[in-house]
Amino acid sequence: MINKLFYQDPYIKEFTAKLVTQGKDEHGNDYIVLNQTAFYPTGGGQPHDVGTIGNIRVLNVEEVEGEIRHYLESEIDDLKLSVQGMIDWDRRFDHMQQHIGQHILSAAFDNLFDYKTVGFHLGNEILTIDLETESLTETEAEKAEQLANQIVIENRVIEVKWVTEEELSRYPLRKETKVKEDIRLVIIPDFDYNGCGGTHPKATGEVQAIKILDWEKQKKKTRVQFVCGSRVIKQLSQKNKVLNELTKLLNSPEKDMGKSVIRLLESSKNTEKELEQTLEKILYFEARDLLKNSIEKNIVSEVFQDRTVQELQKLARIVLTKDENAIVLFVSQNENRLQLVCARGSSEKVSMKGIVGDALTMINGKGGGSDSFAQGGGDALISADQMLQHLLEKIQGK
């Protein structure tokens, strides 16, 4: 482990190393291997470090077959050179805060409720842990969060020990270790004992704070979303900005925001209902005019612009309620698309599904329906007027 400087001291920001080799992986990506490195490779739920080596950006770091590969933005020419490595410290320390914060929160759920953590993901914005329970109450989440933050406030020293498999029995491990040699324990005395290969701060106080954001059921488990450290401040800043904007828009203080939103939603629902009722009335009068002005006996036909299929369907049904002997042929042109609705009353026998199906072959269209009511749409390969004329000819030829 002597070549892994991040284990010797996770606070190392700069280091000097010699280039050992340069190669390509199975995907053709170039990488270099150093005789020692402070760059942490992806593993154990923790993302890799980034930074620079010889002023060239490090894009990815992976450990493959015992060697740590650094994937760079461009190649290094001289393999005999010693190079200077620089860690992106903000990213590294963020990962240190989040990772030990996860240990603390997972231990809190375990100690309080015996909810085991069976999954962990450290994302760019939030973290998640999967708890081995199908449900989580708000009271349980609050108690776990309170205990976790109490451990943070106490600023307990975080110990790291390398032990053998035989020595593991001395420690009350939260979960069984996956490795059988080079076992690294991360210990928060009298609270959490856990095998882990990640980078962690010296004391719990450096986590600053832990905040649970939300949780949801995932199959037979519960996924908890949370943030630690500087991410708590970022989340607070984002949410405060949104609240301030809503306060101005709703002209309501923050404490009354919920009531204001409920009133707004209720008002919106009422407005939508009134609009729907108004549209029904408009369609009613439109259907009456279409029947009144129809030229062909029992055939109500019309070309529209930018009307939805749903609207045309409603209009067709209203026409049929007023005249059960009618045949309805509607075509609407919506930009480069044609929409068709064809319907008939109970006294007619012609198949609207057949009429529409035939017409759709002319415009690469798709549709469906029944013998009495069918609809569809396709590309505007002909004009809406030409399509309506085609439909009329089909009806008149029956």
Image (cartoon, rainbow, N blue to C red):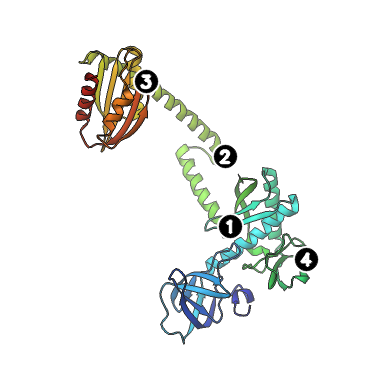
Amino acid found under the numbered disc labelled 4:
Tyr
What percent of the width, then of the height, locates residue 227?
A: 59, 55
Which residue is nearer to you in this view: 122 or 93? 122
Residue at label 4?
Answer: 171
Does residue 185 appear to the left or right of 327 in the view shown?
A: right
Residue at label 1?
Answer: 121
How far apart are labels 2 and 3 at the CA level?
40 Å
Q: Element under label 1?
A: strand
Q: How busy is the neighbourhood of tag 4: few (under 14 within 10 Å), some, or many (20 plus)?
A: few
Residue at label 2?
Answer: 255
Q: Residue at x 42, y 27 (%)?
A: 272
Does label 3 or label 1 sit earlier along the sequence? 1
Does residue 232 appear to the left or right of 132 in the view shown?
A: left
Q: Mark 3 against mark 4, which lies toward the viewer? A: 4
Q: Element under label 3?
A: helix
Does label 1 or label 2 sit earlier along the sequence? 1
Q: Compared to 142, does 3 lie above or below?
A: below
Amino acid found under the numbered disc labelled 1:
His
Q: Residue at x 64, y 58 (%)?
A: 102
Q: Element under label 4?
A: loop
Q: Compared to 364, does 204 lie above or below?
A: below
Does label 2 or label 3 sit earlier along the sequence? 2
